[in-house]
Amino acid sequence: MITYFSRRFTRIRSALLVALAVGAAAQVWAQGLSGEYIISDRWRHAYSMYSGVTNPAFINEENYMALRFLFASTLQEFYMHEAGFTMPLGLHEAVGISWMMAGANKFGATDHTGQLYGISIADQHHFFALTYARNIWSRLTVGGNLNVILQNVANIDSDIPGNEMRFGFGVDVGLSWKLLRHQLLGNHILGLSTNNIFNMILDTDEKYTSALRLSLLSDFWERRIFFGADLLLKDILADAGEWGPGDPKNMPFEFSQKLGANILRIFKVYALSGFNAEGFDHYGFAFGANMPGFFNGRDIEGMIQFVSVGASDASHITFYARTELGRHREEIYARNMARRGALGPNLLYNQALELYYRGEYFRAYWIFSQIAVEHPDFFRNDMVNFYQAACLEGMDMRQSATTAFNRTKDEHSRSVAAPLADLGLMRIHYRNGDHSAVERQFDELNNLGVPDSIKFHAFYIMGQTAIRRGDFARARELFTMIPENHPDFVFAHHSAAIANVMNDDIQGAISDLEFVVTITPQNRAQEEIINRSYVFLGFLFYEDLNTEGALARAVTALRRVPRNSYYYQDALMGLGWTALKARQWRDCLNAGAELARTATDPILQSEGNLLQAYAHAMDRNYGPAINLLDEAARRLNAFTPPNQSELAQRRNEYSSIRSDYERMGARIDELGQARQSSIIQSSIDSLQTPQTRARATIDQHLRFVDEFQRSSFFARSHEQVKDDVEFALARFSRFHGATTGGGTRSSGGTEAIDDELERLQRELEGLE
């Protein structure tokens, strides 16, 4: 039976064993209150700067995710562990978790006689720290730890000694200041932190020792030499009653330092030493290897440390392992910024450009405006302002576009957007027929510093203006200055041919056009100008009365125009008249039939009928010819072509619509300078439908004017075609009556008809 005395003796004996174990470890790790292993650097000298326990602000110096592990052993009885993980968050934040454990080998509990109970006594102290750090201003970083304490210690108060679990928590803070970052003088970081400044172990009066730590981390010579120092002011909040029996009542500080070298960028060597209030405390060394060259520039290292404590024979060995994982924090930040940018102004910019090049100028304008107002620091805002103006130009809001282009020039005078804005102004002045303003913009774009590509666009517009002015020699000179790799090159040579024709240089025009049709088109617009050049060539060869084989060359050129071309009907008309002139009745008949079938204009349809009628008549098939001419006559009589009176009326209506449209443009430009609130958005939505309708009306008027003033190479006016149809109908009807009258026909009548057909043929060949 266990008596009170024996139980008491057993508890005292077990307590003495635990005290002996802990006391022996304390001689190695530190002296003073419990928890010294957390604040002491002796056993983790080489890696203390990586731990958030040392200073929570230090983890923000990590550029990669990092894992570390330490294992220390003394006298083969006592051991310490530390493991940790750190992860940067962007450029300015980091989080981490650390775990420390100090303990001794288990021993058996005995009674007063020394008899073992069969129970093992353990002494293990676990410490967890959840760390957060942030760079809050310039070189200043702050951090904090939330600490969790877990103890598995001997319970000497029970009848049978054993173990009990204790829990606690604590809080620490730290900050760091980057004193200097210099290529020659090195990098130096000063840190100030607390260790166990506030801690509580539940259901006990025990507290861990606390300390205030001042740290210095330095490296020199491109990180080939390291120096670190830590000054700890210990037990600053301890009361006298918290000291254990026999413990020194003052341990005011501990000062430790390390000096290291990186040899060949692989091997590391440290010299370690420390002092305390009682004098020399410890010394030692550490060495190992780091091989970032084998791990894509990331650290992967291992080290071993040996420390001898004071004048005693106690010493310990620590093994270190550390590796970095993942991408550099700056790379991650750049990728995140790219993704955020894709969701911000970059994406908006790309969306707006896509809409702009699809011709959806109204939608594109508001996205460009949103970027300009909500992202004033966007690096492409010069081009954003230009595209705002270009969208207004695309919507044909000429006054507002002029205002926006001038604003772009004022705000971005040194940007490439400025000459682009000048070119936009030049286009608007050309459309407005303001030739003097076009000339001024041309002079502006010929200044030094304007990109050549923009200059050549200006040459093309100025050349077109010179044609309007009648200065054909200057026009041709400007067109021929545009280089082959410029988008306007093919259009310039076609326009040079027009300038040559108007200057009576037919051979020069033919040479220009023959060169144009050899160019490989890069887009639909270039394909069409080449098709127009084929029609132009056909017309010039058709008109050439002196060159042998000119009609054959005309047919060759006209047949190169495809069915899907805007100029296909012009080519068909040219083929019909050329075939008639060459007395190729079958070709004339086919071309006329195709023209009548594909044309939508009544005059062109009637021209197709007239060509077919001539071909039938030349084969003396007067019946089909008369039917075709009857159809054409009815169509022409029912059709009223536009006249000057209607054109004047439409121009008056257009002037009124244009004024309203320009006022709408001014309103759009005004809203485009404001942040797109719900009220502004409502105004924007209310403008879309009126803008679409007004633009459609304006485009319809411009098409009417273009068609009214358009001069086709072979087409004739309504009155000319109507006169020819009526003349041919009367003549062919008479021929038909003469050949069918009374069922017989005289040889004299036939000869008269043949003579008249011959005269008609000569008249047709002489048509211009």
Image: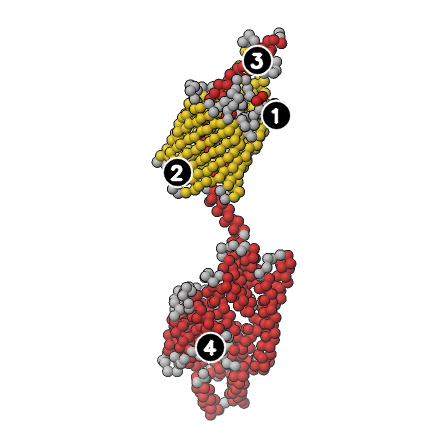
Image spot of residue 735 (x, y percent):
51, 87
Q: Which residue is mark 2?
A: 220
Q: Which residue is mark 1?
A: 202
C-alpha separation, residue under disc 2 versus residue under disc 3: 55 Å
Residue at point 51%, 70% (across, down): 428
Quick one: SS at disc 4?
helix
Sequence-wise, the earlier of marks 4 and 1 is 1
Q: Quadrant of the C terminus?
A: bottom left
> Is the residue 164 above or below the residue 438 in the image?
above
Identify the amino acid type marked 1.
Leu
Image spot of residue 670 (x, y percent):
59, 63
Dot 1: few (<14), some (14–19), or many (≥20) neighbours within 10 Å?
few
Sequence-wise, the earlier of marks 2 and 3 is 3
Q: Are marks 1 and 3 in contact (CB under 8 Å)?
A: no
Q: In the picture provided, is 438 more to the left or to the right than 548? A: right
Q: Quadrant of the N terminus?
A: top right
C-alpha separation, residue under disc 4 versus residue under disc 2: 75 Å
Mark 2 against mark 1, which lies toward the viewer?
A: 2
Identify the amino acid type marked 3.
Ile
